[in-house]
Amino acid sequence: MTVTFEGEEKITYRVITKFRTFDLAFKNRKGLIGFPVRGMCQISGYSGVGKSTLAYTLSGIVGSELKENITLADLEEHFDPIFMGTVLENAGFAGTVYNATGDLDHEKLEDMLAKLKEDNYAIGIVDSLGAISPVSEAEGGLEDSNMGRRAMLVAKLARRSIKIGSKKNKPLVLFATNHVHQIIGGRGTLTSGGVVKDYLSATHLRISVKETFDDGSTLIGGKVDKNSFGYGKRVFYLFNLAGFGIHPGLTAMYDCIMLKIAKLDRTVKMSDKNYGFVKKIIENAEDKDLFEPFHAALSNSIENTVSTEEDEEE
Protein backbone atom coordinates (compact mmCIF):
# COMPACT_ATOMS: atom_id res chain seq x y z
CA MET A 1 0.00 0.00 0.00
CA THR A 2 1.16 3.54 -0.79
CA VAL A 3 0.07 6.71 1.01
CA THR A 4 -0.08 9.88 -1.10
CA PHE A 5 -0.01 13.33 0.47
CA GLU A 6 -1.44 16.42 -1.21
CA GLY A 7 -1.37 20.09 -0.30
CA GLU A 8 1.61 21.69 1.42
CA GLU A 9 4.65 19.44 1.37
CA LYS A 10 6.57 19.08 4.63
CA ILE A 11 10.20 18.06 4.40
CA THR A 12 12.41 17.30 7.38
CA TYR A 13 16.04 18.09 6.67
CA ARG A 14 18.47 15.88 8.53
CA VAL A 15 22.07 16.86 9.18
CA ILE A 16 24.61 14.11 9.68
CA THR A 17 26.80 15.50 12.47
CA LYS A 18 29.27 12.56 12.24
CA PHE A 19 28.85 12.09 16.00
CA ARG A 20 27.69 8.52 15.41
CA THR A 21 25.72 7.65 18.54
CA PHE A 22 24.16 11.12 18.39
CA ASP A 23 23.09 10.63 14.76
CA LEU A 24 21.78 7.15 15.52
CA ALA A 25 19.75 8.48 18.46
CA PHE A 26 17.41 10.20 15.96
CA LYS A 27 16.80 7.13 13.80
CA ASN A 28 13.29 6.64 12.42
CA ARG A 29 11.46 3.57 11.16
CA LYS A 30 12.83 4.03 7.66
CA GLY A 31 16.35 3.82 9.07
CA LEU A 32 17.14 7.50 8.47
CA ILE A 33 19.57 9.00 10.97
CA GLY A 34 20.94 12.48 11.70
CA PHE A 35 19.75 15.55 13.59
CA PRO A 36 16.36 16.79 12.28
CA VAL A 37 16.52 20.53 11.53
CA ARG A 38 12.95 21.58 12.21
CA GLY A 39 11.20 23.43 15.03
CA MET A 40 12.53 23.98 18.53
CA CYS A 41 15.23 21.79 20.07
CA GLN A 42 15.33 22.01 23.85
CA ILE A 43 18.67 21.11 25.49
CA SER A 44 18.26 20.60 29.23
CA GLY A 45 20.46 19.53 32.12
CA TYR A 46 21.89 20.60 35.44
CA SER A 47 24.23 23.59 35.70
CA GLY A 48 27.65 23.20 34.08
CA VAL A 49 26.97 20.08 32.00
CA GLY A 50 27.71 21.75 28.64
CA LYS A 51 24.29 22.88 27.39
CA SER A 52 25.58 26.10 25.79
CA THR A 53 28.59 24.31 24.29
CA LEU A 54 26.35 21.68 22.71
CA ALA A 55 23.98 24.36 21.37
CA TYR A 56 26.95 26.24 19.85
CA THR A 57 28.39 23.06 18.32
CA LEU A 58 25.12 21.91 16.77
CA SER A 59 24.44 25.45 15.51
CA GLY A 60 27.86 25.51 13.89
CA ILE A 61 27.36 22.15 12.19
CA VAL A 62 23.86 23.02 10.96
CA GLY A 63 24.95 26.50 9.86
CA SER A 64 27.89 25.07 7.94
CA GLU A 65 25.69 22.45 6.26
CA LEU A 66 22.92 24.88 5.31
CA LYS A 67 25.19 27.89 4.64
CA GLU A 68 23.02 29.93 7.00
CA ASN A 69 23.78 32.43 9.78
CA ILE A 70 23.04 32.26 13.51
CA THR A 71 21.22 34.62 15.85
CA LEU A 72 21.68 34.47 19.61
CA ALA A 73 19.50 35.74 22.48
CA ASP A 74 21.93 35.76 25.41
CA LEU A 75 19.61 36.04 28.41
CA GLU A 76 22.12 34.80 30.97
CA GLU A 77 24.54 37.60 30.04
CA HIS A 78 27.54 35.25 29.95
CA PHE A 79 28.13 35.31 26.19
CA ASP A 80 31.85 35.05 25.41
CA PRO A 81 32.46 35.75 21.70
CA ILE A 82 35.98 34.27 21.87
CA PHE A 83 34.76 30.95 23.29
CA MET A 84 31.69 30.78 21.06
CA GLY A 85 33.79 31.66 18.03
CA THR A 86 36.26 28.90 18.85
CA VAL A 87 33.50 26.30 19.25
CA LEU A 88 31.79 27.38 16.02
CA GLU A 89 35.06 27.36 14.03
CA ASN A 90 35.89 23.89 15.33
CA ALA A 91 32.39 22.81 14.20
CA GLY A 92 33.17 24.08 10.67
CA PHE A 93 31.09 27.27 10.79
CA ALA A 94 32.32 30.35 8.89
CA GLY A 95 29.27 32.63 8.86
CA THR A 96 27.85 35.46 10.96
CA VAL A 97 26.48 35.41 14.51
CA TYR A 98 24.01 38.17 15.37
CA ASN A 99 23.74 38.89 19.10
CA ALA A 100 20.17 40.11 19.65
CA THR A 101 19.78 43.48 21.39
CA GLY A 102 17.25 44.97 23.78
CA ASP A 103 17.04 46.42 27.28
CA LEU A 104 14.53 43.78 28.35
CA ASP A 105 14.47 40.05 27.67
CA HIS A 106 11.31 40.12 25.57
CA GLU A 107 12.96 42.79 23.37
CA LYS A 108 15.98 40.53 22.80
CA LEU A 109 13.68 37.65 21.91
CA GLU A 110 11.69 39.86 19.52
CA ASP A 111 14.96 40.97 17.89
CA MET A 112 16.11 37.36 17.53
CA LEU A 113 12.78 36.28 15.97
CA ALA A 114 12.92 39.25 13.57
CA LYS A 115 16.37 38.11 12.46
CA LEU A 116 15.13 34.57 11.86
CA LYS A 117 12.61 35.99 9.38
CA GLU A 118 15.49 37.19 7.16
CA ASP A 119 16.58 34.99 4.28
CA ASN A 120 20.14 34.29 5.46
CA TYR A 121 19.32 33.39 9.09
CA ALA A 122 17.97 29.94 9.92
CA ILE A 123 19.46 29.04 13.32
CA GLY A 124 18.46 30.65 16.61
CA ILE A 125 19.84 30.11 20.12
CA VAL A 126 18.08 31.09 23.35
CA ASP A 127 20.44 30.83 26.29
CA SER A 128 18.56 30.15 28.49
CA LEU A 129 14.81 29.72 29.03
CA GLY A 130 15.31 29.72 32.79
CA ALA A 131 16.91 33.18 32.63
CA ILE A 132 13.92 34.87 30.96
CA SER A 133 12.79 37.79 33.10
CA PRO A 134 9.29 39.14 32.28
CA VAL A 135 8.76 42.92 32.39
CA SER A 136 6.91 42.68 35.70
CA GLU A 137 9.92 40.94 37.23
CA ALA A 138 12.57 43.12 35.60
CA GLU A 139 10.92 46.40 36.53
CA GLY A 140 8.88 45.40 39.60
CA GLY A 141 9.84 44.77 43.17
CA LEU A 142 11.34 41.57 44.50
CA GLU A 143 8.12 40.91 46.37
CA ASP A 144 5.95 40.95 43.21
CA SER A 145 4.35 37.65 42.22
CA ASN A 146 5.30 36.52 38.69
CA MET A 147 4.14 32.91 38.66
CA GLY A 148 3.20 31.82 35.16
CA ARG A 149 4.44 34.93 33.34
CA ARG A 150 7.71 33.34 32.28
CA ALA A 151 5.79 30.30 31.07
CA MET A 152 3.48 32.52 29.00
CA LEU A 153 6.47 34.26 27.40
CA VAL A 154 8.21 30.96 26.63
CA ALA A 155 5.00 29.54 25.14
CA LYS A 156 4.67 32.57 22.84
CA LEU A 157 8.33 32.21 21.84
CA ALA A 158 7.81 28.55 20.91
CA ARG A 159 4.62 29.22 18.94
CA ARG A 160 6.07 32.17 17.02
CA SER A 161 9.27 30.34 16.11
CA ILE A 162 7.16 27.50 14.69
CA LYS A 163 5.13 29.95 12.59
CA ILE A 164 8.29 31.63 11.29
CA GLY A 165 9.66 28.25 10.30
CA SER A 166 6.46 27.25 8.54
CA LYS A 167 6.58 30.38 6.36
CA LYS A 168 10.19 29.95 5.24
CA ASN A 169 11.06 27.75 2.30
CA LYS A 170 14.14 26.42 4.07
CA PRO A 171 14.89 24.51 7.29
CA LEU A 172 14.88 26.49 10.55
CA VAL A 173 15.81 25.37 14.05
CA LEU A 174 15.71 27.16 17.41
CA PHE A 175 18.03 25.77 20.09
CA ALA A 176 16.82 26.59 23.60
CA THR A 177 18.96 25.67 26.60
CA ASN A 178 17.17 25.02 29.87
CA HIS A 179 17.99 24.13 33.46
CA VAL A 180 16.75 21.08 35.31
CA HIS A 181 15.42 21.65 38.84
CA GLN A 182 14.36 19.37 41.64
CA ILE A 183 10.63 19.57 42.38
CA ILE A 184 10.25 21.40 45.67
CA GLY A 185 8.49 19.21 48.20
CA GLY A 186 8.17 16.36 45.73
CA ARG A 187 10.05 13.75 43.77
CA GLY A 188 11.56 14.10 40.31
CA THR A 189 12.68 17.07 38.26
CA LEU A 190 11.26 19.75 35.98
CA THR A 191 12.50 22.43 33.58
CA SER A 192 11.82 26.16 33.58
CA GLY A 193 9.24 27.81 31.34
CA GLY A 194 6.09 25.75 31.82
CA VAL A 195 4.79 22.72 29.98
CA VAL A 196 3.74 24.28 26.64
CA LYS A 197 7.33 24.44 25.44
CA ASP A 198 7.61 20.69 26.10
CA TYR A 199 4.58 20.04 23.89
CA LEU A 200 5.84 22.32 21.13
CA SER A 201 9.51 21.25 21.14
CA ALA A 202 10.19 19.04 18.14
CA THR A 203 13.17 17.50 19.92
CA HIS A 204 14.35 17.50 23.53
CA LEU A 205 17.87 16.48 24.58
CA ARG A 206 18.62 15.76 28.23
CA ILE A 207 22.36 15.76 28.99
CA SER A 208 24.55 15.06 32.01
CA VAL A 209 28.24 14.68 32.83
CA LYS A 210 29.33 11.04 32.92
CA GLU A 211 33.01 11.67 33.62
CA THR A 212 35.25 14.66 34.33
CA PHE A 213 38.94 14.79 33.41
CA ASP A 214 41.89 16.68 34.91
CA ASP A 215 41.98 19.36 32.19
CA GLY A 216 38.29 20.22 32.69
CA SER A 217 37.07 18.14 29.75
CA THR A 218 33.93 16.07 30.23
CA LEU A 219 32.26 13.05 28.75
CA ILE A 220 28.64 14.00 28.12
CA GLY A 221 25.96 11.36 28.28
CA GLY A 222 22.68 12.29 26.65
CA LYS A 223 19.22 10.96 25.95
CA VAL A 224 16.73 12.06 23.31
CA ASP A 225 13.75 12.61 25.61
CA LYS A 226 11.56 13.61 22.67
CA ASN A 227 11.92 13.07 18.93
CA SER A 228 8.95 14.02 16.78
CA PHE A 229 10.64 12.56 13.69
CA GLY A 230 11.67 9.13 14.88
CA TYR A 231 12.31 6.99 17.91
CA GLY A 232 12.76 8.58 21.33
CA LYS A 233 14.59 7.67 24.54
CA ARG A 234 17.79 6.72 22.74
CA VAL A 235 21.15 7.56 24.32
CA PHE A 236 24.37 9.07 22.97
CA TYR A 237 27.87 10.12 24.04
CA LEU A 238 29.69 13.37 23.21
CA PHE A 239 33.16 14.41 24.34
CA ASN A 240 33.40 18.05 25.42
CA LEU A 241 37.08 19.01 25.17
CA ALA A 242 37.90 21.98 27.41
CA GLY A 243 38.25 25.18 25.38
CA PHE A 244 37.38 23.39 22.12
CA GLY A 245 33.77 22.22 22.18
CA ILE A 246 32.50 18.80 21.13
CA HIS A 247 35.60 17.04 19.81
CA PRO A 248 34.97 14.77 16.78
CA GLY A 249 37.92 12.43 17.39
CA LEU A 250 37.39 11.83 21.08
CA THR A 251 33.65 11.50 20.50
CA ALA A 252 34.36 8.90 17.79
CA MET A 253 36.56 7.00 20.24
CA TYR A 254 33.78 6.87 22.86
CA ASP A 255 31.23 6.04 20.15
CA CYS A 256 33.34 3.01 19.28
CA ILE A 257 33.42 2.05 22.95
CA MET A 258 29.66 2.52 23.31
CA LEU A 259 28.98 0.50 20.15
CA LYS A 260 31.41 -2.19 21.38
CA ILE A 261 33.74 -1.69 18.44
CA ALA A 262 36.49 -0.72 20.89
CA LYS A 263 37.07 -1.60 24.53
CA LEU A 264 37.99 0.60 27.50
CA ASP A 265 39.62 -1.16 30.40
CA ARG A 266 42.54 0.74 31.88
CA THR A 267 43.47 1.69 28.31
CA VAL A 268 41.60 2.00 25.00
CA LYS A 269 41.95 -1.00 22.72
CA MET A 270 40.60 -1.69 19.22
CA SER A 271 41.49 -4.39 16.69
CA ASP A 272 44.35 -5.68 18.81
CA LYS A 273 45.90 -2.21 18.98
CA ASN A 274 46.38 -0.42 22.31
CA TYR A 275 45.92 3.36 22.10
CA GLY A 276 46.98 4.00 25.68
CA PHE A 277 45.38 5.78 28.61
CA VAL A 278 42.48 8.18 27.99
CA LYS A 279 44.39 10.99 29.73
CA LYS A 280 47.25 10.66 27.22
CA ILE A 281 44.85 10.51 24.28
CA ILE A 282 43.20 13.75 25.46
CA GLU A 283 46.62 15.42 25.63
CA ASN A 284 47.10 14.50 21.95
CA ALA A 285 43.63 15.69 20.88
CA GLU A 286 45.12 17.94 18.17
CA ASP A 287 46.55 14.91 16.36
CA LYS A 288 43.75 14.15 13.87
CA ASP A 289 45.57 11.09 12.53
CA LEU A 290 45.33 9.49 15.96
CA PHE A 291 41.54 9.26 15.64
CA GLU A 292 41.29 8.15 12.00
CA PRO A 293 41.00 4.43 12.92
CA PHE A 294 37.96 5.21 15.11
CA HIS A 295 36.31 7.26 12.35
CA ALA A 296 37.03 4.50 9.84
CA ALA A 297 35.62 1.82 12.13
CA LEU A 298 32.42 3.79 12.58
CA SER A 299 32.08 4.44 8.84
CA ASN A 300 32.41 0.74 8.14
CA SER A 301 29.73 -0.13 10.69
CA ILE A 302 27.03 2.31 9.59
CA GLU A 303 25.53 2.75 6.12
CA ASN A 304 25.76 6.17 4.54
CA THR A 305 22.44 8.03 4.83
CA VAL A 306 21.36 11.01 2.74
CA SER A 307 20.69 14.25 4.62
CA THR A 308 17.41 15.29 3.05
CA GLU A 309 14.48 12.92 3.14
CA GLU A 310 10.76 13.11 3.72
CA ASP A 311 10.11 11.67 7.18
CA GLU A 312 7.09 10.01 8.65
CA GLU A 313 6.32 11.71 11.95
CA GLU A 314 6.26 9.01 14.59
Image (tube, rainbow, N blue to C red):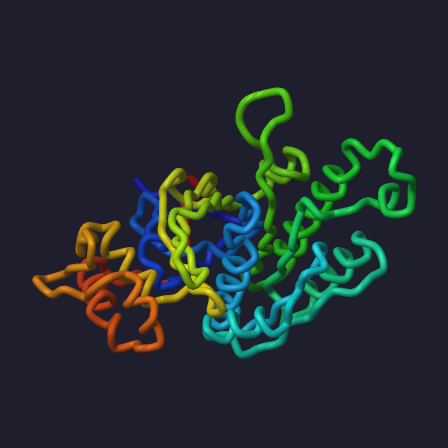
- Quadrant for residue 56, please give it: bottom right
Instruction: Provide residue 206's location: percent of width, then percent of height.
Output: 48, 43
185 sits left or right of 258 in the view: right
Query: Which residue does the image show at 46% across and 65% down from the upper left?
Result: 242
Q: Is residue 177 above or below residue 102?
A: above
| In this view, 110 is above or below 209 | below
Q: Nearer the viewer, residue 25 or 43?
A: 43
Q: Position of residue 98 (x, y in %)?
A: 69, 70
Of 65 and 131, nearer the camera is 131
Q: Quadrant of residue 199?
A: top right
Q: Quadrant of residue 115?
A: bottom right
Task: Tell me which residue sits at (76%, 43%) in the image.
Answer: 153
- Residue that protrudes farthest toward the right in the picture: 140
Image position of 120 (left or right of 94): right
Total number of numbered labels? 0
Q: Give the side of residue 263 with respect to residue 157, left or right.
A: left
Determine whether, in the image, residue 298 is placed left or right of residue 72.
left
Q: Residue at x 53, y 26 (%)?
A: 188
Q: Nearer the viewer, residue 174 or 86?
A: 86
| In the image, farthest residue toward the left | 272
Q: Residue 15's x, y, as percent?
A: 42, 62
